[in-house]
Image (tube, rainbow, N blue to C red):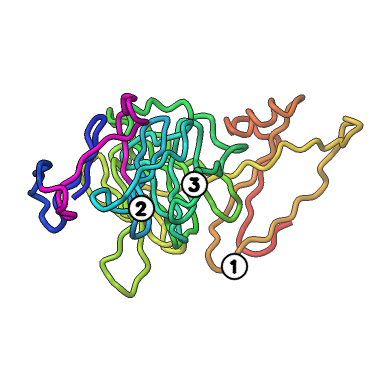
């Protein structure tokens, strides 16, 4: 059993999670072991999270450092620092990726450590990290990351302990983009999340523990109809577009055509918002008030 508290990490005796005799014979390679993550003679940082990586690596996170324990500390293992700039923001603010890599959320954004902890953490959201993920009060939020193999991305959940509205995102591998999410009510917000399957032949689904004490799971895309009884609503803002081109001349939109999936698409309400600046048009679309034009798109082709 491996765990950490404050500045120290602890390992029980191999095969006996109740044996923490750190005074055992040094020649006993299965003995209990403990230590810190720091340079020799320097005070260690408080350890926030532990992430096993592969068969022979353990990643240890503080809030601004990342360390890797390679091998067995009672049999020649050693600890290496792989970052003095980024660390995890919570004990569950990391997850394994599809190829054995480890993703984690730091104060600076979403990072990934290569399989086997063979390199330094690399940013995966440097240019497009949502600002509110940087502004979260991590001391008062439960942060969880979980990889969803069905959807091909990572859920980032930050649920306030006060059970108010949280900050949640889906990070899509295909487009390298973040998509904000909300739940039907604050009780559904996850204070913990894991990828889990009770069937060895089925792909793992994302399982959530809600503030209300219920356990829920996220269904496949074509099965999602409600948030546990609350209707699902989604929207997409496209633009803003400079309809006048580089000349900034006035322009008229004369035609809009849509092609939607025939089998699974519900009706879509399309609205056009305008503004004298790109920011004004964007803000009008986000607020969704006083559209200049409204139309309904149905499955198939609409003009």
Q: Is residue 213 magenta?
A: no
Q: Which residue in the protein does label 1 denote?
A: 262
Q: Residues within 10 Å of mark 2 (few under 14, many from 20)?
A: many
- Magenta region includes residue 46: yes
Select label 2 or label 3 by which is in front. Answer: 2
How far from the left and from the top, in percent, is residue 139?
32, 26
Q: Label 2 to label 1, Cα distance in Å? A: 48 Å
Q: CA distance from mark 2 to mark 3?
A: 15 Å
Is 274 situated above or below 102? above
- Asked if residue 228 can be seen in this view, the reply is no
> How far from the left and from the top, in percent, is residue 69?
34, 46
In the figure, residue 43 lies in which quadrant?
Answer: top left
Looking at the rendering, the stretch of residues picked out in magenta corresponds to: 25-50
Q: Is residue 175 toward the left or the right of residue 227 in the image?
A: right
Splitting the image into 4 quarters, where does residue 49 fall?
A: top left
Give the side of residue 289 with respect to residue 15, left or right: right
Q: Residue shown at 82%/38% (left/top)?
A: 243
What is the x, y in percent for residue 115? 46, 56
- Measured Cα–Cα span from mark 1 to mark 3: 38 Å
Residue identifier under label 3: 112
Do the residues under discs 1 and 3 have CB atoms within 8 angstroms? Answer: no
**The one of 108 and 152 positioned closer to us in this rendering:** 108
The numbered dot on residue 57 is 2
Please give the name of the residue rendered at 42% of the width and 28% of the height, measured from the top-left corner: 136
Query: As rendered, which of 248 and 199 lies closer to the eye?
Result: 199
């Amino acid at each position: 059993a491996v765990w950490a508290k404050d500045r120290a990490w602890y390992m029980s005796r191999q095969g006996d999670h109740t044996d923490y005799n750190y005074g055992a014979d040094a020649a006993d390679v299965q003995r209990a072991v403990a230590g810190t993550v720091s340079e020799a003679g320097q005070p260690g940082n408080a350890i926030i999270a532990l992430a096993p990586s592969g068969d022979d690596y353990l990643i240890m996170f503080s809030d601004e450092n990342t360390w890797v324990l390679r091998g067995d500390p009672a049999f020649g293992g050693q600890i290496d620092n792989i970052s003095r700039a980024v660390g995890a923001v919570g004990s569950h603010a990391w997850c394994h990726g599809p190829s054995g890599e480890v993703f984690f959320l730091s104060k600076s954004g979403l990072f990934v450590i290569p399989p086997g902890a063979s390199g330094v953490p690399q940013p995966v959201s440097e240019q497009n990290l949502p600002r509110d993920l940087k502004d979260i009060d991590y001391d008062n939020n439960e942060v969880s990351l979980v990889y969803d193999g069905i959807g091909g991305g990572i859920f980032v959940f930050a649920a306030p302990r006060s059970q108010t509205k949280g900050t949640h995102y889906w990070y899509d591998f295909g487009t390298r983009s973040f998509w904000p999410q909300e739940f039907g009510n604050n009780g559904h917000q996850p204070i913990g999340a894991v990828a889990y399957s009770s069937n060895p032949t089925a792909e793992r689904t994302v399982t959530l523990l809600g503030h209300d004490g219920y356990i829920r799971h996220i269904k496949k895309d074509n099965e999602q109809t409600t948030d546990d009884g609350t209707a699902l609503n989604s929207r997409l803002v496209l633009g803003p577009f400079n309809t006048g081109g580089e000349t900034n001349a006035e322009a008229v939109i004369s035609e809009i055509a849509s092609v939607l999936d025939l089998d699974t698409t519900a009706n879509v309400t399309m609205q056009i918002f305008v503004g004298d600046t790109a920011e004004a048009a964007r803000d009008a679309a986000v607020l969704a008030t006083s559209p200049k034009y409204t139309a309904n798109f149905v499955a198939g082709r609409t003009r």
